Structures are given as structure tokens and as C-alpha cells.
Image (cartoon, rainbow, N blue to C red):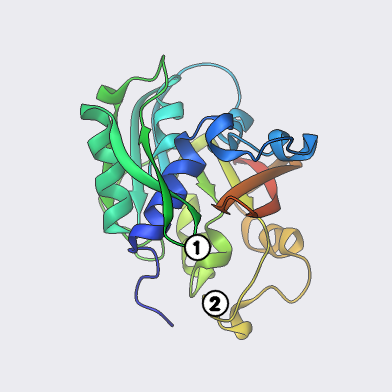
Amino acid sequence: MPDNPYESRKLLSEYLLFHYGRPSEILPEHAPQGMEAALDFAVRTPGHFSDGEVSRALDLGCAVGRSSYEMSRSCREVVGIDFSHSFVQAADSLRHGPLDYERIDEAHLQTALEARLPEGVDPARVRFEQGDAMFLRADLGRFDRLHAANLICRLTEPRLLLERLPDLLVSGGELVLATPCTWLGEFTRPEFWPEGSTLEWLQKHLDHAFLLESSADEPFLIRETSRKFQWTASQVTRWKRK
């Protein structure tokens, strides 16, 4: 298994574009309608939480931080954790101003772009740290909301996180999990994959502590070059801590 595949400059730029890019910076000219519907994934997944303001929120696998900052709109304290040092550094630097990066267009052709925080978020409510979702520090405390998008099927032993989840949420707290269910041997050995569907597997491991409240699909789009895009649908489930 790779120690950390998320430290390259290329991936950092792709994720900054994925999280903060404007439609005109991401989409090709005359893009099909379905491509536009897949933008702003890191905004849409936190939108699956209930309305209202809460005290504490945890964003696991926060990448370059857009979902963490979005959660600051309704959470008085947000902790964003990611395995990638470069992602966490980029997410944190955005609180101080725009961040320059390069969009790959074709071969050596690149376009200089700038990531910046959207209006209405509160950076003072957010802090970031590097960490492993399977081995979170013991003193994190408990949260009212926990968001983990496109994380679970990228862990070497995902059950380690599932076993920790009940201790991370207060009674009545909400858990939003998003996963494209793309289980790959390069990240997770097949013996740790679900035997049936991912949703059935999640229910098996979470039903003792959580009530499944909703399930929906959310598409997302990652631009690699001007002619290559990843279009994927992530299964988003919301759970309530019993």
C-alpha cells in the first residue's frame, strides 16, 4: 500500500480546482448539462445535514478544506482532518488570502488560477490538522456533526474508522458519509471490502449505534485536463446517533 498518494503538486492543483474552481474554469466550452450538475460537490454534501446551528463539527478527509469552511456557516467550531500534509497546508493558508495554483490543460500547457474562500464562511471557526482517519487522536472529543466525503473506500482498514464513529458523536448527533463505492486494491485489500453492497455493509457496522435517516446520490466532477474529466456518483447517507 502507498504511504500517502496525495502529496503531489498535480493532485493538489486538481483538488483546489475541484473545491474552489468556478464553472468557467472547470467546464469545457459547450459542456453537457450533466457536467454542470456535478459541480460544487464539497458544498452539496454538507448540505445533507439538518438545518440549524450546532456547536462542534468534524470533517474527516477534508482535502483542501471547502467542506470544512462551508460547515462554518452553521457550526461554531469545525475541525478538518486530512491525511495529506499539502492538502491541510493549502486549506489552512486560504484563511489568510487567495492561493495560486496551476490548472493542467494539455501536455506542458497550464493556466494560472487562484483559489479563494467563498463569501459567508467564517475562517475563525475552522482549524485544520493532519491525521489518519483510522487512528484519530484520543482527545478529539465529541461532535454534533461529522462529515466524511469520499473517504471510506480509500482507507486501508475502513472498519477501524467505523468502530470509532460512535464515540465521536453526541447522542442525536448527525453523521454524513459519502462514498463512490469504488473499492480498489491499491488502497484497500480485497479482504477488507464489503461482501455485499457498501450500504448493507455500513448498516451492518453502524446500526447498533446509528439510525439511517436518508440515502441519496450526488454526482461529482474532477477535471484532469481540458479533454479528460472524472464523472462519478457518490452515495450519500445521513445517520443519527442513537
Identify the amino acid type marked 2. Answer: Thr
What label sits on residue 49 in the rendered view? none
- 156 versus 74 height, above or below: below
Which SS class for mark 1?
A: helix
Which SS class for mark 2?
A: loop
In which quadrant is the C terminus drawn?
A: top right
Residue 181 relative to residue 99: left or right: right
- 166 versus 54 height, above or below: below
Identify the amino acid type marked 1. Answer: Glu
Residue under numbered circle 2: 188
Residue under numbered circle 1: 163
Q: Where is residue 37 in the image (x, y as percent from the top left)?
A: 72, 34
Residue at the image point whose x is 37% and y is 26% from the top: 117
In which quadrant is the N terminus drawn?
A: bottom left
Local crowd size for mark 1, using a 10 Å CA cut-off: few (<14), some (14–19), many (≥20): few
Residue 118 relative to residue 127: left or right: right
Q: Where is residue 143 in the image (x, y as percent from the top left)?
A: 41, 37
